[in-house]
Image (cartoon, rainbow, N blue to C red):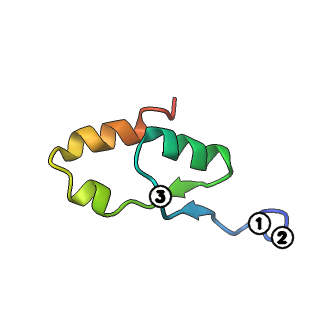
Amino acid sequence: MKATNASVRVLCGAGVKNGEDVATAISLGAEGVLLASGVTKATDVALVLADLVSKLH
C-alpha cells in the first residue's frame, strides 16, 4: 500500500481482541487499530485497554 501511495494511512479495523493482536497489526504495517464493542461492552474497560497496549513496548 505504501509503495503505491505513501500518504495512505493503514488501520486494522477487525479482529483486534488483545495486545497480541495490536502488536501483530502494527508489525504488519498498520499505523493503528480501531476498537469497538470489545472495549465498550467490557466490564472493566481500563483492564481491556491496558491489555491492548501491553505489547507495544
Q: Above or below — where is 5 with respect to 29?
A: below
Q: Earlier in the sequence, mark 2 or mark 3?
A: 2
Q: Earlier in the sequence, mark 3 or mark 1?
A: 1
| Residue at the extreme right of the image, as rendered | 3
Q: On the image, which quarter does residue 3 sit in?
A: bottom right
Picture residue at 50% right of the left edge, 45% below the top: 21
Percent coordinates x, y for residue 39 in the rendering: 28, 54
Task: Give the position of the N terminus as an image quadrant.
Answer: bottom right
What secondary structure is marked by label 3? loop
Percent coordinates x, y for residue 41 in the rendering: 20, 58
**What crowding class fits label 1: few (fewer than 14 Cα within 10 Å), some (14-19), or many (20 or more)?**
few
What's the amino acid at mark 3? Answer: Gly
The residue where tag 2 is placed is 4
The residue where tag 1 is placed is 1
Q: Is residue 44 left or right of residue 4?
A: left
**What crowding class fits label 2: few (fewer than 14 Cα within 10 Å), some (14-19), or many (20 or more)?**
few
| Residue at the extreme left of the image, as rendered | 43
Residue closest to the eye, 5 or 29: 29
The CA span between labels 2 and 3 is 25 Å
The residue where tag 3 is placed is 15
Mark in front: 2 vs 3: 3
Picture residue at 50% right of the left edge, 39% below the top: 20
What's the amino acid at mark 2? Answer: Thr
Picture residue at 63% right of the left edge, 63% below the top: 10
Q: On the image, which quarter does residue 54 sit in?
A: top left
